[in-house]
Amino acid sequence: MQDRRGALRAVVLARRDPGAPACADVRWENGGCAPLCFEVTVRFLLEDPEVQGYLITMVDVTALRTAEGRLRVSETRTRALFESAIDSVMIVDEVGRILEFNRAAKEMFGYRSEEVIGRQFAPLFFSGHEREAFEHGLATYIDKGMSPVVGRRLDLKARRKDGVFVPVEVTAIPDRKTVDGSLVFTTTLRDVNERVSYEQRLQQALANVADQKTKLEAILSATNDGMVFLRHSGHVLYANRSFGRILNFGETSLVGLTAEDLAFRLRDRRPAPVDSFERVLGVTPRDRLGLPSLRCDTGWPVKQTLLLTARPVMADGLTGFGRLAVFRDITKEEEARRAKDDLISNVSHELRTPLTSIRGFVDLVRRKRAGPLTEKQERLLGIVTENVDQLTALVTDLLAVDGVENRPLALASVDLVPVLRDVIASERPTAKAKGLSLLLMTPPELIVEGDGARLCQVFTNLVANAVKYTRVGVVNVRAIAKDKAAVIEVQDTGIGMSPQAREQIFERFFRAHDEYVRGAVGTGLGLSITRTIVERHGGKIDVESEPGEGSQFRVLLPVLGPQGLPRRPHPLDEEATCAMEALRRPRVLVVDHDRHMQKITKATLAPVGLDVRVASTGRKALEEINRERPDLVVLEIELEDLNGWEILERLRQDAETERVPVLVITAKDCLKKALRLGAEGFLRKPLNPEMLRRKVLRLLLLLGSEDELVGERS
């Protein structure tokens, strides 16, 4: 671009060659506006020899030069994009020749540009029907303006220079932006080898999942137990065929129903207890974390006895994914149990009556009521008496086994100290007759929750065995409270037992192969009964013994706190067991800004086996709830940052936290508001520690019943 002085140079050039015009672009300043560009042509006048001069022509080419500059920039950018593209890109003309070949194409196919420019695209990269289809597609597009291979993605196999075929995704886009207006195709070839590999693995994984799903559904359909799986949101995800058969739903699809809807449909089965189906499906707040065992009788359309259980399903061992409710039809088992009970009752009655007569008449004879006896007769009658006693003990133990396993426990607060004193008093005459010392060491009181008669049976059996199998020495009974458990030890200096005997000592009908043991009256059922009773109380029993060194039996039972509160789960009714694994260590979050109240609340709840966490602000509480999902939130309304009511509303509006139980604590009388906003419980300050502990335990399913809870609310 020249200025006006450039025009003078053009004139000079024209003079040197008068026959040729001089041409140059001249830049013309435009008074502060954008400069103009003129194409200046200078021609020397030769027609008239008498006239000396030049013909200067100026053409405004500003717009033309601007467009040319932009075009050069665009071409530079296009070329840069073309060369830097990750995919292989080639420009193919309308007859199929390759015009351009980018760097990615060189790397992918191994050709240099000069090896492919001008060659036919389709024959070079494709073979067989794929080549024919592509060539035919281009020709069809040129002829008719449409084609199945132009403007679409095609999955083909392209040949590299080394002859290896690779899977590619081919796209041909038509373009007439050429100098002469001819048609070209921008053809992109994308290497999909990795994608194909992923797709193959995905297809295989999906096939495996489908196969596993089919197998799982076949297994679940074949099982006799009815199963319903509910999502964390409470909607039914799956119900097997046995559920439809047991509850008379037939082939009706239950998928998508809420737990509340399904429980409502089951009400016409007339369950007893009436809330059985609500509990197993997690509708009731106290059973949302699981239901260990519940016996339910239905009255329509047929009378059935069902055993209902529910367990949380964990996605990764920590995160709650859903709930599995199991419905087992135990109608036949119950009928068999009742038949067995009747048989045992009848047989025991029929046996005890003649045994009583035999024993009575033998005693009369031994007392010489029928005349004097010889020494041999005395010995033979003694053998009869021993066998009658043994048979009587067997009948008694058989009845005891049935009662221990099938009869509900009469639970109450039991002080073990007077129970142990009564046991010692009853066994002291036998010990004294054998010359044994019978010692008892206890604290002033040792309170547990249990069935007093059954616990007396446990310690009577242990102490009686210790006295029975000890020739000389001491039987020592010691009871202590240790690590929140009642520990009762019965130690003797008797015959002891071998390692093999220790492993089998709690099995039914087991008696050690020892002459002294075989000589004593026994059925081998006593310790089996003892273990069953202890385990039904949530405790455990073990033994330490060596041959000739005596034995020590140790019973551990959960103790009650100073106010008579249990430290671990207990039955909610007579039909439930105490093995609530899902609630082994319930987590309680205490939300209170007052440090003293935090300490008091934690000191009140921690001793009863709860994992107590503390949050001093509302925001920290929400973070803790979203992260840990506590089993219960103890919420103080008056907080420094967020109002407790706002926290409660947020919890109930979030599908992930709407089922977290909340116990509201405040100095104001806000019971109705707390219940309206979805709280499960309410306490008004000042707090009674015992009332707080009982309320928390009831909300966690550890104590009491729903009726009691409702009563306290009112």
Image (cartoon, grey):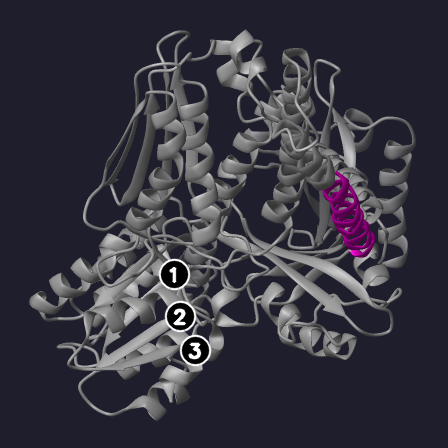
Could you tell me the amino acid type at mark 3? Glu
Q: Position of residue 357 (x, y in %)?
A: 73, 40
Find residue 194 and report its image quarter.
top right
Is 473 left, or right, of 521 in this rendering?
A: left
Disc 1 or 3, which lies upstream in sequence? 1
Tag 2: Cα neighbours inside 10 Å, few (<14), some, or many (≥20)? many
Could you tell me the amino acid type at mark 1? Asp
Distance (Cα) linking label 1 and label 3? 20 Å
Find residue 282 and report its image quarter.
bottom right
Q: Position of residue 340 (x, y in %)?
A: 78, 47
Q: Main secondary structure of the magenta part?
A: helix
* Closer to the eye: label 2 or 3: 3
Figure quadrant of the N terminus: bottom left
Give the structural element (helix, strand or loop) at label 1.
loop
> Residue tagged by mark 2?
661
In this rendered view, identify the residue nearer to me: 533 or 600: 533
Disc 2 or 3, which lies upstream in sequence? 2
Q: Residue furthest left?
A: 596
Q: Which mark is residue 708?
A: 3
Q: Position of residue 127 (x, y in %)?
A: 86, 26
* Closer to the eye: label 1 or 3: 3
Is 663 left, or right, of 96 in this rendering?
A: left
Q: Eyeballing the image, is 54 above or below 22?
A: below
**Could you tell me if the residues under marks 2 and 3 are in contact, i.e. CB atoms within 8 Å?**
no
Q: Eyeballing the image, is 667 above or below 535?
A: below
Could you tell me the amino acid type at mark 2? Pro
Give the structural element (helix, strand or loop) at label 2.
loop
Q: Is residue 466 visible?
A: yes
Magenta-span inclusion, residue 701: no
| Residue at left offset 38%, top offset 61% | 631
